[in-house]
Image: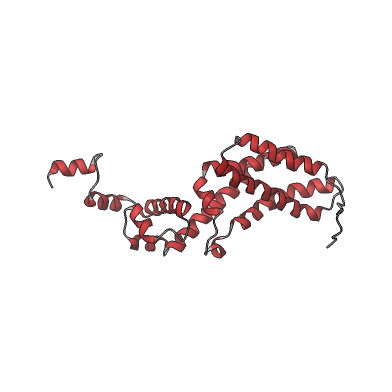
Amino acid sequence: MSDRNNARGTAGGTAGPSARRARRVRMTGKERREQLLDVGRVLFAERGYEGTSVEEIAHQAGVSKPVVYEHFGGKEGLYAVVVDREMRRLLDMVTGALTGGHPRELLEQAAFALLDYIEQYTDGFRILVRDSPVAQSTGTFASLISDIATQVEDILGHEFSERGFDAKLASLYAQALVGMVALTGQWWLDAQHPGKADVVAHLVNLSWNGLSGLEPRPRLIGHRKS
């Protein structure tokens, strides 16, 4: 290949094998690891865990299979890191959004944070809500929702105590509220309407007005009692 062809291959044109090898040499171990994580996140979101192969990850990253094994020990290791990062990102966004104020505003902040994550990190959210055979080692979306609900539980517990309700039930209500927002978020991701602020307003309308009319000791009206 002539010098001109070599230059064209490395300056804006289609890079040949030698150029790709050069790029691999210049990329540090940390940069390569981040690249593989980015590639894996996109593929896992599109195809799921089972539909993604080490071969495809390596191909998309422009490396050989042993490079993937060197950094993560295989597909399961890469998937575990991707899921862990997304779970931490979502939890940090929710906890960081709870900056205080009126309890209703806190509900708004939590709902906005979850929908912000869904909107900004769609690939990550699609991965989290998928079932995976390695969920036991990486955690599940249900476990993440439970972690977020723990943050909300502290808020509800205080409000319950102030209003004479059983504070021990705050955990139950926190799970119900956070689960409602999470499931609505899954629906909203595909529906793409109404707008995010409208979704938050309606979610908080349902939860807040439901909480404001809460009965201290709710009773069943049907015949079944257990």
* Residue 103 coordinates in the image, percent (x, y): 75, 40
* Residue 121 coordinates in the image, percent (x, y): 51, 45
Q: How is the image coloured?
A: secondary structure
Instruction: Please tell me which residue is depicted at 87% across the width and 58% down the height of the picture.
Output: 223
* Residue 195 coordinates in the image, percent (x, y): 60, 34
- Asked if residue 100 shows in the view, the reply is no
Q: Which residue is situated farthest in the left direction here?
A: 2
Relative to 92, say whether 84 is above or below. Answer: below
Give residue 2's quadrant in the image. Answer: top left
Give residue 187's quadrant in the image. Answer: top right
In this view, the residue in front, 65 or 190, is 190
**Tally of numbered tags:** 0
- Asked if residue 209 shows in the view, the reply is yes
Q: Which residue is situated farthest in the front direction here?
A: 223
Q: Quadrant of the C terminus?
A: bottom right
In this view, the residue in front, 105 or 214, is 214
Relative to 39, say whether 120 is above or below. Answer: above
Instruction: Please tell me which residue is depicted at 25% across the width and 44% down the height of the picture.
Output: 14
Q: In screen coordinates, is 139 left or right of 61? A: right
Instruction: Please tell me which residue is depicted at 56% across the width and 65% down the height of the picture.
Output: 136
* Residue 79 coordinates in the image, percent (x, y): 47, 58
In this view, the residue in front, 190 or 120, is 190
Q: In screen coordinates, is 176 left or right of 212? A: left
